[in-house]
Image (tube, helix red, strand yellow):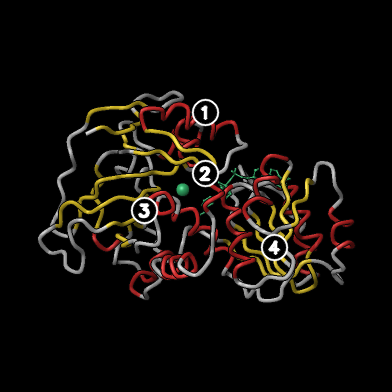
Amino acid sequence: MQALAKTRPEPGLWMERRPVPEIGPDDVLIRIRKTGICGTDIHIWNWDDWAARTVPLGLVTGHEFAGEIVELGRNVTGLSVGQRCSGEGHLISNQSRQSRAGKFHLDPATRGIGVNEQGAFAQYLCLPAFNVVPLPDEIDDEIGAILDPLGNAVHTALSFDLVGEDVLITGAGPIGIMAAAVARHVGARHVVITDVNPDRLALAAEVTDVVPVNVATQDLRDVVAGLKMKQGFDVGMEMSGNQAALDQMIEHLVMGGRIAMLGIPPGKSPVDWSRIVFKAITLKGVYGREIFETWYKMIAMLENGLDVRRVITHRFDVAQFREGFEVMRAGSSGKVVLDWG
Ligand code: NAD
Ligand code: ZN
């Protein structure tokens, strides 16, 4: 089969011929139809310090996918050949206290496909049947291929009650934009999204009903005043990984405000903890998605009017994967989806 692998310790990914994976008794074999390119894949392409530390050379990359089950391990029940699916890319153990309590997304032994284990940028993927998420007919393959990052957005957005609340999202990358759409869908009042990239803010406004703010040129205080909020935002979602954005969020939150933090700062970054204390702010770190509650809720919302299709700005045949990665690396696109035929 064809597979996009990290075979050399330098920028790039290379299309290789690999054997079709052999599945174990509890696995399924999935024929991949569409994959999404993630920021994580860009780190791996660039071979930055994190990637060099984390990713074994030779690995097939990719973790955002939709496809069709073509083979079932002998112990697998409840799934069938021909079934369309996506799946959770975090492989977990059933040993830890968290897993045994049903909090699978908090298992410290989690391993990621396309990061630690063979990934989905290939014609076939072997996945534990436990991780498979069947797709209803209403969700086509390209949306199926972005359920992983949509899951990040949904998990973050559903961290706190948003009904009637004023929400600030810092970072209008694909995940921030999808989180804005989710916040609107579940009944937030004002949703303000910030970025320093006008293309991304324009995309946010195309995808959903938000107030886009370019913090490089606009003062967030004026926006808050214009929206007639009394003190500031009730809930913040940090989706940029940028220190200045987090500072700004803390400044513009109400007393007792809540922050869900998905963005990954590049290293240690200073925080004015006294402001968190005096404003009595609740800060929640968000990792991945809840397995499988987030999947359940996101599919239900997609079946009931949540529309994130416009966040997909580019589609390429997998033969043109280099163009796809260049578009993503330029930093102004939404999601880029590759078609595996
Ligand atoms: P992205 O890099 O595409 O988007 C981040 C955006 O933040 C960019 O558009 C950038 O211009 C913007 N930004 C930079 N400085 C800013 C500032 N001062 N104020 C406001 N915005 C600013 O990222 P993404 O793919 O949408 O992912 C969002 C974040 O979530 C990233 O940090 C990513 O690493 C992280 N992430 C975390 C998890 C997790 O499990 N915790 C999973 C996926 C992604
Ligand atoms: Zn991803």
Label 1 neighbour load within 10 Å: few <14, some 14-19, many 20+: few
Q: Quadrant of the N terminus?
A: top left
Which residue is disc 2 drawn over?
A: 335
- Sequence-wise first label, 2 or 4: 4
Label 3 neighbour load within 10 Å: few <14, some 14-19, many 20+: many
Give the alpha-carbon distance from disc 3 to disc 2, as whole Å. 18 Å
Q: Nearer the viewer, residue 59 or 310?
A: 310
Residue kind at label 1, given as amino acid type: Glu
Residue at the left extreme of this rendering:
74
Residue 236, disc: 4
- Determine whether, in the image, residue 193 is placed left or right of residue 260: right
| Residue ID at (71%, 76%) | 164
Give the alpha-carbon distance from disc 1 to disc 2, as whole Å. 12 Å
Which residue is disc 1 drawn over?
A: 326
Q: Residue 333 falls in which quadrant of the image?
A: top right
- Sequence-wise first label, 3 or 2: 3
